[in-house]
Amino acid sequence: MATVSSLTYEELGSAAQRDRRRRILDATVSLASKGGFDAVQMRAVAELADVALGTLYRYFPSKIHLLVSALARQFEETEANLGRRAIPGDDPADRVTYVLTRATRGLQREPHLTEALTRAFMFADSTVAGEIHVVGLKLTAMLNRALQGDAYIEGTQPTDREIAVARVISDVWLAALVSWVTGRTTTEEVSEHLETAVRLILR
Amino acid sequence: MATVSSLTYEELGSAAQRDRRRRILDATVSLASKGGFDAVQMRAVAELADVALGTLYRYFPSKIHLLVSALARQFEETEANLGRRAIPGDDPADRVTYVLTRATRGLQREPHLTEALTRAFMFADSTVAGEIHVVGLKLTAMLNRALQGDAYIEGTQPTDREIAVARVISDVWLAALVSWVTGRTTTEEVSEHLETAVRLILR
DNA sequence: CTGAGAACTGGAACGTGTTTCTATTATGCC
DNA sequence: GGCATAATAGAAACACGTTCCAGTTCTCAG
């Protein structure tokens, strides 16, 4: 049976295996930060992570799985950082704009890394559904938290409207990211576009 | 000097060349319709179009350029079909929904083709900016026409708000397409999501 | 018609993602 | 400790996008 999903941190038995997984993702992020999508070459990742090519493929069944898994890990870190303090802003629009701006600036600080992760995300096919789903959850969780503001409590069910709003905003955000990553818009245009969209949707 | 953009129909001198270009795009669409992105193999396209591989690369400098150019041609056809009669619907929301639904259904009838074209579009980098721009223009033109309805006259300048609305909607549409193409949502969910988004944005 | 330059053909060759295979090493059970 | 099994290393091989090149055919100015 061909493997179709990446090995997650949790399902790896030994400490040595968890460490291999970590080294692989570290190597991926490191190479991606320097040279973007094209620089993440499977042989290079394997060498930098000090594992054999076959092992790399045992952990991540394709380059796309590898990059999307790296994206998921980055998101976890972002969420952990953002998760501690309250999101500033008096109404949902301000808070959402704040979160988007902050996240976007973070990404723009590492353009090559962002390019690599975004392209992988957009190129992913159905075999990567599991990994993609993880990313989607984190993203909508963040946006819901921004929408609800102080009223937010871990596990609160968002309303249908909030779900829809979060979905539309993340769509716009992704599209903006793609057009930035592919050199079709500048960082300023991305910020403007996001603000405009938020105003349009949240009045 | 390496070629960076596809040869357009207009800049091809002879009838033989225009015919080669047409054959290449026909072959591309034909292969994509059958097997999607992966089935569009450059050697296969060249053979089916009855040109040498080198010639194919003279016309389209990469597989992505080729597929995005095919997308542009498809859009022209759609626009030509849609362009004749008035768009039904009493308010902008209805008209936009109508256009989106119609376009989406068309795409869903050819899932493999749609998958190939969408993935190419999303994977394109800045060297494909020219071809992408063409597609973007057609898309926003269609949406603006839907927004303005009867008031639409060829060449009317849309308001800033209309531009922003068209942009957000096309973002959502693209994201919806991607998630459908990658098997993360069903056709029904795509329609629902689009309708929800339109309602949200156009009140 | 003729010659020069551009376009095209056919095919080899290269790079990188992916697969496969064998030998070696680590792990867990008795 | 000793064995069965799984995991890993190392390396070759394959697939397809892309590049390159030598020879041929087309185009068109003079």
Image (spheres, coloured by chain):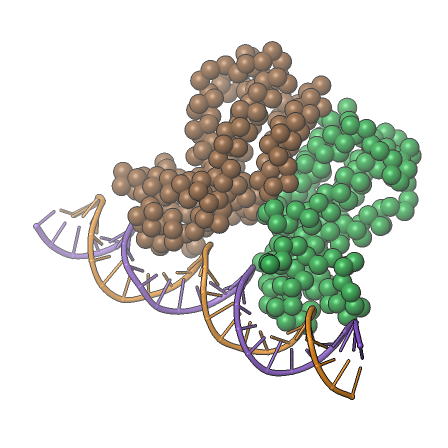
Chain colours: A green, B brown, C purple, D orange
- Residue D15 lies in what quarter of the image? bottom left
Left or right side of A47 for B74: left
Residue drawn where x is 41% and y is 44% of the image:
B31
Q: Answer with left or right where residue B84 lies relative to residue A86.
A: left
Is C19 above or below relative to B10? below
Q: Position of residue A105 (x, y in %)?
A: 75, 46
Q: Horizontal and vertical percent for residue A164? A: 74, 30
Compare residues D20 and A57 and report the one nearer the observer.
A57
Question: Which of the 4 image quadrants contains residue C4?
Answer: bottom left
Rendered-image quadrant of the C terminus of chain A: top right
Asked whether residue B6 appears in the rendered view, the answer is no
Residue A182 screen position, x and y as percent: 59, 46
Residue at 57% x, 25% y: name it: B100
Q: Is residue A186 left or right of residue B77?
A: right
Instruction: Report the side of A188 relative to D14 (left or right).
Output: right
Mark yes or no: residue B87 visible: yes
Query: How far from the left and from the top, in percent, is residue B165?
Result: 65, 25
* Residue visible at 63% across and 58% down in the picture: A3
Kindly identify the residue that appears in the image at 61 percent across and 41 percent down.
Answer: B183
